[in-house]
Amino acid sequence: MGSAGRRSVAFAAVAALWALAGWPIAASAQDAPAGERKSIALDNGAKPFPESGEVLMQSDDLSYDRDAQIVTATGHVEIAYGQRVLMADKVTYNQKTGVVTADGHVSLLEPQGDVVFADHVVLRNEMKDGVIQTLQVLLTDKSRLAGSDAVRTNGDVTTVHRGVYSPCEICEKQGQHTPVWQIKAFRVVHNKTEHRIIYEDAYMEMFGVPVFYIPFFSHPDPTVKRKSGFLTPSIASSTDLGQEITLPYYWAIAPNLDVTLAPRFTTKEGIVYQGEFRHRLESGSYQFYATGTWPDTRTAGTPGDSVFRGSLFGNGEFNLAPKWSWGFQTELVTDNTYLRKYGLSDATDLTTNVHLNNVDGRDSFSANAYYFRNLLAGTNRDYTPWVAPTVDYDKYLGDLLGIGRLKFTSNAMMLGTPAGLDSRRLSAAFDWDKPYTSRGGQVYRIFANLRADAYSTDKAPDPAAPGTFFGQETIIRALPTVGAEVSYPFVRPDPGLKQVIEPIVQVVYAPNIGNNERIPNMDSINVEFDDTNLFSENRFPGLDRWETGGRANVGLRYSIYGAGGGQASVLLGQSYRLKEDKSFSDATGLRNEVSDYVGAIQIAPNDNLVAVHRFRINQNDFKFSRNEFDVLARTGPLTTSLGYAYFAADQAVTTATGAREELSLGTTLKLSRYWRLFGSTVQDLANSGSISNQIGIGYQDDCFGLAFGFYQSNISYQDIQRSNTFLLQITFKNLGSTGVGSQSTLSTRTDSMGIVNPGTTLFGDPDTSLFGDPAGVMINDSRRPGIGSNR
């Protein structure tokens, strides 16, 4: 058996002995029957172990010299004491001196889980101290430390001479005997008390070739989850900021409290200060991330003309009592382009919120306060509302005498705008419905809703006369709705296949009273008619507007299900109303008596192919008003995502520039087990231009990662400039990662198949460091920007 095989067997045997360290003594050496392994309970005359401890020694052959008080064991020797287990071909134990000497295939299991392998070991002081020859150590994370010899003192400091460290696996089956990378040093010290591995006079090898020399450095051992120290620095270059370097420092103040400071030094914009504070309490946790700069260059007439630019993001969640909780979310920024210019986030809408929640079964209560900010160019902040507060209470009243389910909902809200709008709303509603399935398979549902609203408003804008406002108003309205829905699914089961055709008809009636324009529309502005709300009783997303009049929603759904889990479905539908509803704009496709056609096609024959097509077709000219198509496909080593989106010029998501039409493509090609090629592009088909492009190559194994790529962004507005960037990132397991490239204008996102989505950067954030490691993150919120998110 080779050395690797012996070690694996020894490791398994040591692990088993750990659990069996408390075995009772079966027999003495003199009384053991022939052919059985011998065991003996030793006399602690020299007191090498505490009197309360028992040493168990077992072997194939065992001799005991009572005069010299020396025990000699040979053949599969096993010594167990406390949490340490020693195995070897031969072991001698001198009870007078307390010295244990082991030779041949020596393995020692440590209390922390490390396993020491050696040819010759001399141990004393309860096997805590000693001298080891031809040392090899398997650490708890399967990293390896080896050396010509080592000395251990106090049971926690091991000094290795001519040491080698590597976390990389060695695959002898493929003929690879050298790890991808390793550190060789004249002296390596593993201090288990301080949980650090220290190197003196060291150099790193890549694929057996020395690449650089380090006179002294250290990193945490595998037991460390959080430790103060400098994190991996990062270097970057960009058109906007010039050359830059970020020097993060992590401070573990307490087990539940830490701070990370990461100043970014740039050649064009001076210093960008960054800091993150995280705190976990018994009742919950919270965190804040703040950035700020006094830019060296200022662009007149743009957001970059500010003396100070900065942002504050944060969030927290806390338990107050059983079923009660409160929390907050903070998203504040000084100007519209700061986050994108400095590569912190590509968000276009920011929301600051404080909330109080109670959930009790089907009943719920929530109170919220909101502050909104839109970062798109041309947004008039005078009409961006704040809400303080909005209160919701929902109560499920149950099934009343078997005649249907009843639910009570209510809302109270106060909002205002910098322009002076003041609006107060009180709303209460009862919702009732009764589902029923007939013996013939028809599915029925009848429903009714009665809602009452009361508004008190002042300075509400007049939609008919822009720039003018209504005076103080008090408005009360009652909004009843009744309806019924019936569907009749026809099922055809075939061998290995099931088909379902389901026609659906829904009839809804509400008084055709329209909507009072004196009620400011703050929560029902954006209405999107699609397959998801074809059968909704009210298609307005908020309470300020209400869908009135009589209407019928008709649709047909066809589904097919395979025995192997594959499926596909098609939904096509349309809405008909008795009278035009002017509450909807022409852009929604719902205003006229006959609506646009909406539908969706979904195809997923297996896990390697998923395709979704969603559309809305104008009912007059049969042209697409909205057309969205997404495909995710994997075939062999190639994984591809394709996206297409078209929105007509009158849609809510388009601007004055006209129709929006984009094509996005992302692909990853696995060249081998460790190498992959990836790239993506986003094309503006409406204006015949490119939005962004990227291509790169990456290597990733169990201990080393390398990625190199090119990223091009053609986004340019205000003080944001177009940029071309070369990106490089290198990652070493247990040491961290570093990169050379540019601050990105878009955040990093990859899907579950590893495809780099179009319009994103190449690399994510490193989570380890060279001198410290804030791993074991207490709070995680992927939405907010964070230190390192500019990579």
Image (cartoon, rainbow, N blue to C red):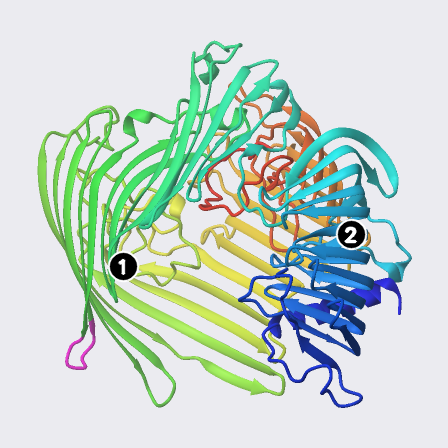
Give, as a single range, the part of the protein colored magenta: 399-405
Which residue is labeled 1 in the image? 578
Whether residue 46 is visible:
yes
Could you say which quadrant of the image residue 710 lies in? top right
Q: Is residue 404 magenta?
A: yes
What is the distance, in whole Å, between disc 2 and disc 1 at their CAs? Answer: 92 Å
Q: Secondary structure at mark 1?
A: loop
Q: State the residue position of label 2.
A: 132
On the rendered image, what quadrant is the C terminus found in? top right
Give how far across and how far down residue 262 sits, in percent. 53, 27
Q: Is residue 206 above or below residue 261?
A: below
Q: Residue at x 30, y 40 (%)?
A: 353
Main SS type for the magenta part? loop
Across and down, in percent, residue 691 comes to 62, 33
* Residue that appears at 44% across and 45% down: 779
Q: Is residue 715 left or right of residue 586?
A: right
Name the foreground residue: 68 vs 655: 68
Residue situated in front as seen by the camera: 459 or 103:
103
Position above or below: 725 against 255: above
